[in-house]
Image: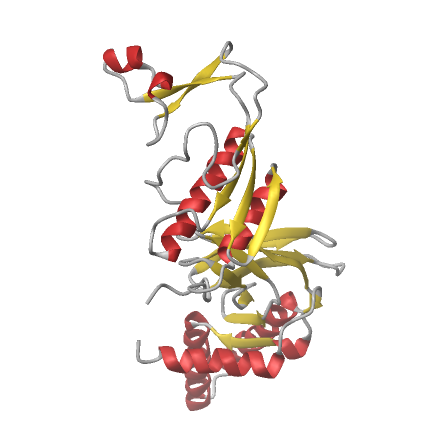
Amino acid sequence: MLLEPVRVWLREWALRRQGHDPDPVALRRRRIYILPTPLGTGFGLMVLAMLLAAMNYSNSMAFSLTFLLAGLGLVTMHWCHQNLCGLVISGVRVTSTFAGEPATLQITVENGSATERYEIGAVCGESKAAPRDLEPGERIRVELRLPAHRRGRLPAQRVRLYTTFPFGLFRAWAWLHPDASGIVYPAPEQRAPAPPPGGMAGRDAVTDPAGGDDDFAGLRPFRTGDPPRRVAWKALARGGELVVKQFAGQPAATAWLDYDALAHPDPEQRLRILARWIVDSHGSGRAWGLRLPDAEIPPSSGMAHRHRCLRELALFPGGAGPAGTEHA
């Protein structure tokens, strides 16, 4: 914990010095760092001890073995550094997610050279990707998890590409500072009240009278506000859960999900309830619109409409911050 401020300062200094990386970006020699691993440090101390022993006894065979191992170490260092040089990083993106669930940072690593690359790994915070080999011209997709504790915009954290090939004596690495971000939606309220019967919440709910209750489509869990006539009382009498009957021909509703229509004093609670209703509305196939104090999205449906509405909730002012940090 005492070193954390130093680490934060070093990350900020590196970002100021290097800036955000373009997409794509190639790893050149000046971007790659290399240091001995603990195994490599022990190997170096062993070679030094052998050199002192050879000098003390003036043994030509000991000198030969010492210089052979030292040369092997130098070749290993060059090979380890060269293993990263020339790789191309592209396609950086951060997936959208709900608060409390991890987002995914996706990057594409390409080997554009004519030689194979071995044991290329990646680290982002606490998330690690297992080292993989790349054939000449091969591309691989690397996925790393990012914590998303609160709604808002989630910037991509810096990524460290590394390798310890060939013998684990050295570790070469390069830092990437992606200029990408994702959206963290409000976590859907688990105990959200159900929208009023016949449609969604808010004013100006419109119901299409077409259809009927003739075709039974299945059962779903009961939610507060469901009409009693829809409850499957026979299933409940047999000791089952409280469920509600759904019909393929039941009226389709076009409705407004209205922020101001909710009575909760906590704005974040309102956003979580709206997120729950958006997810449920999308699953039902109904059309819905969203009203916020500073935005209005007309009724529609589909995945793009779902993302647009959830994005408005995620970026709603008054509480959103860096999504990778927890609430105070």
Task: Please provide percent x and percent y for residue 27.
Answer: 67, 70
Residue that lies at the very extreme toward the front in this rendered image: 204
Residue at point 52% right, 59% down?
Answer: 315
181 vs 195: above or below: below
Question: Could you say which is closer to the camera, residue 281 or residue 175?
Answer: 281
Residue 85 appears in view: yes
Question: Could you say which is closer to the camera, residue 4 or residue 255?
Answer: 255
For the image, the number of numbered tags is 0
Question: Left of 18 or right of it: where is 99?
Answer: left
Task: Please provide percent x and percent y for residue 244.
Answer: 37, 21
Question: Could you say which is closer to the camera, residue 190 or residue 181?
Answer: 190
Residue 96 appears in view: no
Q: Quadrant of residue 289?
A: top right
**Quadrant of image for the N terminus:** bottom left
Task: Please provide percent x and percent y for residue 239.
Answer: 23, 15
Question: Could you say which is closer to the camera, residue 79 or residue 234?
Answer: 234
Residue at point 42% right, 90% down?
Answer: 56
